[in-house]
Amino acid sequence: MKLTRRNFLAWAGLGAVGAVACEGFGIRRGELDIQSPVRLPEDLVRGSDNWYASLCRTCPSCEGIVVRVMEGRAKKIQGNPLYPTNQGKTHARCEAGLQALYHPDRIATPMRRSGPRGSDEFVPIKWQPDGIDSLRNALRANGSSSVMITEPLRGHLGLLVERFASAIGGEHLGFEAIDNNTLRAAVKNVFQQDTLPDFDFDNSRFILSFGADFLSTWVSPTRYNRGYGEFRQGEGRDRGMFYQIDSRFSMTAANADKWLPVRPGWEGHLALSLAQVIVSENLQARGVDVDTLVGGDSGIQALNNFRPETVAPLAGLTPEMTGGDPVEFLKNLARSFASNRPSIAIGGGSAGAQSNGLFNLEAIYALNFLVGSVGGKGGVRFNPGSPWDDVPASSKVGSLEDWTRVAEQIRSGKTKLLLLHGADPVHGLPDSVRLRDAIAQANDLFVVSFSPFIDDTSVMADLILPDRVSLEDWGDDIAEPGPGYQVVGMQQPVVNPLGDLDPLSFPDVLLTMAQELGKESQLPWANFKAMLREGSDALFAMNRGSIEASSADEFWNNLLRRGGWWDERRTGPAGVNAPDGLFRTIAGKATGPDFAGIGMGSDSFYLAPFAHNTLLDGYNGHLPWLQAAPDPLSTVTWQTWVELNDVTAKRMGVKEGDILRIESSKDSIRAVAYPTPAAPLDVISVPFGQGRKHGSDYATDRPGRESSNVMDILETTLVKGTGSLAWAGTRVRVSKTGESVSISKLEGNARAVEIGLTPAEKIIKTIAPENA
Amino acid sequence: MPSRKMLPLMIAGGVVTVIMGFVVVVLLISWFSNPPFGLGNAPAQPIAFPHTVHVAENNIQCEFCHRNVTKGAAATVPAVETCLFCHKDIDGGTVTAQAEIDKVRTAFETDTPINWERVHRLPDHVRFIHEAHIRYFTDETIPVKYGINGEEITQSLDVAQTCTICHGDVGNKTVVQPKIGQSLKMGTCVDCHRQNSVSTDCTICHK
């Protein structure tokens, strides 16, 4: 090609266009930048994670956890391998603690009510001056007629709240929908102990459990699961034997060698029946003074009223259940329990939630004296108290009698200020207490909630001052039940709140108020961290336990690093003496259970409510992971289901997914039918935990998702001797609504068939008979 | 003058020539440069940071600022706060130096991160872990090791000496630039791994 002036210009133009185009393929400005952040806290090294020890607060057992934090954000929660109670394991509930941290429904700022009470209409306000001033004015005006309702509190927060309530002249009550007051009373009456004991499943050879769903929800399930693993499969030992006596087929019952579906409320009679066999056949452990324990001849005579021949029909035992004569079954059970030592008897859950619950539990725990399992290896182990003189090791929880009184005080205008933290009593109390109505109609009442979430009680608040969630805040705990020795757990803030949230720590707010109200003498600390640090210094001064340090600062750092302090040498009492005539005393209290309400007609059922595996009593209802975690047996998620016997269901024409109406004398609820062969003919079971009316979408009802609160229909029967709610003491009628939904469960959606029965296999067998 | 019929062919030929030329230039740059697009030059930085003053004169260790280099994958650049550990009190010896230190203080006071221009960069599909390499070259139990260009190393190295194997003598540079003439291509990595009897599995380096 000839290079002419025109060609030259054409090529030059093309070249220029190409150069511009090529520049577009280059690296954009800033692409290769590497940025120096302005500040670099120790835990903000990019690409490098840090694990902080802390405590889980998604259930009352308060397990030790470690939290993975990357670049200032918590990513994962696991068990703290050093922490004595859970030893590196956790319940699924703990892992969902992250969802409380990042929850989209967290209350971002303080809020004041702007509509009618309970209307869920609030306007955001600032902490200073609006929020803090309103709280101070309310405390000044009505502190002496206040009631503070919190979650069950142990450790320094328990001390702080008690002192604060006392300083302002008010009352403090811990709230737990399914409380352990009856269990505590039984432990006190039988063993004379103020704290809950530990159970040495690891070394036991026979576990006899009455109503305690200890592998799923009861008291400290992670610790019990560890012990249970050793009990069944520990090295160098035989596989232990385990009987579960319970009116519901729980996850624990599903693991038992034998599940005995006792008639609700007759567990204590069964326990005394076993005692009668042991005593009459002289099977007690060597060294047990039966005469003193039973109470002489009069005790023997009292026990003789509980012969298996008498008790088996009362407890509803049939030959189908026991695989033969129920009387012989009970006798053999007593013989096995007495001969396979060390053996242990535990009771709780529905066994203690009857009008005669205290009698039931006392009779069950007294069995341990007969087999020599009190304080010994493989038996009941006692816990020591708090390492500090004034810090409570055990949580104080109100009974139903207390809550009925509080509701009445609100109605009468005697209580003018209600302070709420970590408790949702409107959801967690039977509807018949009418707490919601009392709060809604009290004109002189001022309600302050410190909850970071809206729930059925905080929605009634006049002022909401959102607390930090546990991963953002300080705290501590005295493990209850401990592992038999003193354990203190430490909770430290592993992250700061997200930028769009403005919570303040609840204990810090209380301490600020104490100073502003001139109560420094009782609460002299500048903030909660300073209070905890003083506790740490006191532990350091004791010069014992798991942390060796040369200075108080070093001790504090190690305390935080390890997630706690424990002293294996500071154990509870090695053994306790039984009160003289213990069995005679217990037998004297024996009564059958009361079922008030609709009566014992043949058209009604026993209602056996149970704690939900992950939501518990509803405490975790707002956490979607826990809503979506399948129930271990039915695999149902998100919904309220009712377990009923499949034969009963067939008789009623009920099939899975039908919505049933469950009605007591108090009210009725709806629940999705789940027929199962693993349910007694006359018992239906419904989980607690669902049916919130306000708050997070994850917790409240929505179209197509049946969500009901079984508390709404419970009779307000009290446990004699403790005043707690006998939540398993209700009879109900069940009817069809005519509606049906798809039950949201994992099990059964993929059809399981026996090999050899599918159509394809039949064809193969037909054409190739040798494969048959 | 080309005929009218030839004009589309000429235009197409021109476009193809330009594209091919671009491809050739990119390949040449990639082959002869240090990691792509760098050409071994020293990029302009927002603040003049003389390693000579900090390392050679004042003996500050590499890992004092690049704090993650012995702990994880990335060496990391220091936070502005780290500079203020010293420059809260230490002023520059010259007016120019003082002006640069003032930039650092201003960044800290105004809460503004500093965007440094990256000097060394490996492609996104490569995983390079500083910590593992420093651990190897400072391991006194391995008697003989080989450097990035096959040179035999018999004495035990400290962290700073290890850094120089790939990065050159940064401590004596006023302006940081890649080690002159040093290839950081895949072949270099593979050769070094082979000589040191380290695995050459694909997944060792490739994500």
Image (cartoon, rainbow, N blue to C red):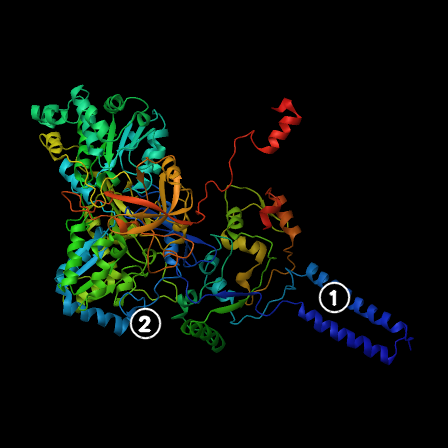
Amino acid type, label 2: Val
At a point 32% along the width and 71% down the height, the residue shown is A124
Q: Nearer the viewer, residue A142 or A647?
A: A647
Q: Tag 1: Cα neighbours inside 10 Å, few (<14), some, or many (≥20)?
A: some
- Residue A140, how many percent across, how many down? 15, 69
Label 2 marks which chain's residue? A
State which quarter of the image contains the N terminus of chain A. bottom right
In the picture, residue B19 is in which quadrant?
bottom right
Q: Contact (CB < 8 A) between labels 1 and 2?
A: no
State which quarter of the image contains the C terminus of chain A. top right
- Residue A537, how many percent across, how many down? 21, 52
Q: Nearer the viewer, residue A191 or B13?
A: A191
Residue at label 2?
A123
Horizontal relation, residue A365 to residue B124: left or right: left
Horizontal relation, residue B17 to residue A603: left or right: right
Q: Secondary structure at mark 1?
A: helix
